[in-house]
Image (cartoon, rainbow, N blue to C red):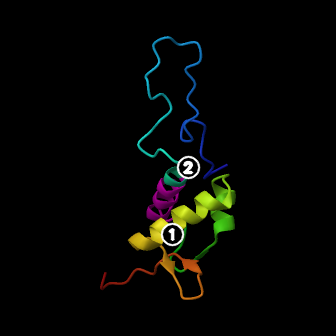
Amino acid sequence: MAGVLDKAQLGGTSYEGDDHAPQNAGVTAASTLSDRVYEALRDALLLGEWLPGQKVTARAVARQYDVSLSPARDAMNRLANEGGLHLSDTRMYRVPQLSADA
């Protein structure tokens, strides 16, 4: 299923029984689930998987990335703060429309 974070992205790397495992095995630059959802959603937006003007809901993000609502909301809020999503006064998220002025 596209969009589902795989075990490695979720820090599920297993070094069980390996005496030479790195000390921080399974820890990536994106160390929280919210960070990983943020990165995956940001990449999806950059690749055009979400269309300009499209409504984005926490439920849709949570379902797409197989996570609960909290990391989905955290990722969406972070993207909204950075301009990657538009948050309306009614708390509705949309993919921003691009213009020639941008």
Q: Which residues are magenta?
A: 37-49
Whole-number angstrom distance, CA of label 2 to CA of label 1: 14 Å
Q: Which residue is depicted at the point 46% across and 66% down? A: 78
- N-terminal label among 2 and 1: 2
Q: Which residue is at 54% across, 78% downward?
A: 94
Tell me the tag on residue 16.
Answer: none
The x and y percentages for residue 12 are 58, 33
Residue 72: percent from left, percent from top: 60, 61
Q: Nearer the viewer, residue 99 or 33?
A: 33
Specify whether 47 is left or right of 63. left
- As drawn, the residue found furthest toward the bottom would be 89
Q: Main structural element of the magenta stretch: helix, strand or loop?
A: helix
* Disc 1 residue crowd, few under 14, some 14–19, many 20+, Cα 10 Å: some
Q: Secondary structure at mark 2?
A: helix
Which corner quadrant of the image does residue 55 belong to? Answer: bottom right
Q: Are marks 2 and 1 in contact (CB under 8 Å)?
A: no
| Image location (x, y in percent) of residue 58 | 64, 67
Residue 21 at least partly seen:
yes
Total number of numbered discs in the rendering: 2
Residue denoted by label 2: 33
Q: Amino acid at mark 1?
A: Asn
Residue 49 visible in the picture:
no
- Residue drawn at x 60%, y 87% as measured from the top left: 90
14 over 78 or under it: above or below: above
Q: According to the image, label 1 marks what residue? A: 77
**Is the residue 71 above or below the residue 92 in the image?**
above
- Amino acid type, callout 2: Leu
Q: Is residue 40 above or below residue 77?
A: above
